[in-house]
Image: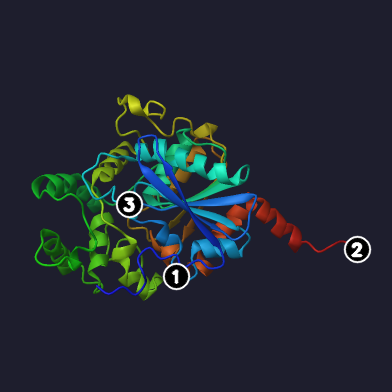
Amino acid sequence: MEREIPLYTLDGVRDAEITTHWFSTGDKLGLSMLRFCRQPSDDVVLIVHGLTTSSDMFIMPEHENLVTFLHRHGFGDVWTLDFRMSNRFAYNLRRHVYTMDDVALYDFPAALETLRSVVGAARVHVICHCLGSAAFMMSLYGKAVDGIASVISNSVSLTPRIRRFSSLKIKVAPPIIEGLLGIEYINPLWSADRGATVGKLISKIVSAVHRECDVPACHMLSMMWGTGFPALYRHENLDEVTHRRGGDLYGGTSLNYHRHVRRMVEAGHAVKFRPDDPRYRMLPDDYLEHAHEIDTPVLLITGRSNQIFTNSQLVTHRTLQARGCTNTELHVFETYGHQDVFMGKNVASEVFPRLLEFLGAHSSVGAHRTEAAVPAQP
């Protein structure tokens, strides 16, 4: 496979000082954050990816990305977190037992402690996606983190909902793939395996079903994550370069996180995976238990064509409103799906302005912009 864009490139962000900040979690994993600092700010934005993606989804060079957009609109200090679900680490490529409780309890508190040791008293805003969004909302509503100025949560958070066929897949896939086939992880790039492998055979079978495009990695991603042709996004929203390099932007994963998603889908909302495990006693068994006590402003966003987590954010919004959480907003992007909300070719004009509006309402950046828009009095 010949790459059009280098793997893990930082070329998508110009005119910023880029530094890497390493830290360790309480359960002894090494993780990292990238800081893109154009200028110091009283408002810092931390961006969180989903399962098997990475910081790369927010710094794509083929079109204006989220980090560059935020820089251009006054948020000069932006951080991207690569936590244990990131394809920049190898933690997903073995049969682990990590759950979203681990992410909520260990990854986000350690990341925020590291970030705050650098930025001091700056307000911290979080933009999070997919299972990174669900895990961060679990961390916030489970009171593992606090002091967050605002949160923008995409696709899924506290009430996961999936389509019927996806529900069947997460029930049968782990025992078949791990137990029967003995496969450690699923890889969207199996089609590029050298020689004859089981993964390459699986990829060919999946591509025989998915005839909507000629990119095998796209077919595998639909099989791995949702229900649709394709499942992760709407083809027309992607730059073709982005579409072709999907195998780089989404990595392989083992299947234990799928088990936690299944547990929460069956419960109807976010719950602890192992309620009797003393390691997680700091977290509530039910992540909605303290919802009425959380006053952090939250914007729930999703695409109308979300084939991964369907109407999850709409249900979360209704659920939180019913529990007295009046600080929660909802926005549905009519022509978008799951992943293209951040990775689509036109997101800088069609999606990001709504995020900026919300951030501006809860930051000094927005206050300065409002003041600048008011003409001086004679």
At label 1, the amino acid type is: Pro
Q: Which residue lies furthest to the right in this view?
A: 378
Is residue 18 visible in the rendered structure shown here? yes
Residue 149 percent coordinates (x, y)? 59, 44
- At 35% across and 52% down in the image, what residue appears? 86
Mark 2–mark 1 contact, CB under 8 Å? no
For label 1, the residue is 61
209 and 5: which is toward the camera:
5
Question: Is 333 left or right of 231, judged from the image as shown?
Answer: right
At label 3, the amino acid type is: Phe
Mark closest to the chain's N terminus, 3 or 1:
1
- At 36% across and 75% down in the image, what residue appears? 240
- At 56% across and 61% down in the image, what residue appears? 70
For label 2, the residue is 378
195 and 373: which is toward the camera:
195
At label 2, the amino acid type is: Pro
Question: Is 51 left or right of 189, judged from the image as shown?
Answer: right
Of helix, strand and loop, which one carries label 3? loop
Question: Is 174 left or right of 113, judged from the image as shown?
Answer: left
What whole-number distance in Å separates the C-alpha atoms at marks 2 and 1?
46 Å
Q: For marks 3 and 1, give the one nearer the viewer.
A: 3
Q: In which quarter of the image is the C terminus?
A: bottom right
- Using a 10 Å C-alpha cutoff, classify the residue at mark 3 as few (fewer than 14 neighbours), some (14 to 19) or many (20 or more): some
What whole-number distance in Å separates the C-alpha atoms at marks 3 and 2?
59 Å
For label 3, the residue is 89
- Using a 10 Å C-alpha cutoff, classify the residue at mark 1 as few (fewer than 14 neighbours), some (14 to 19) or many (20 or more): some
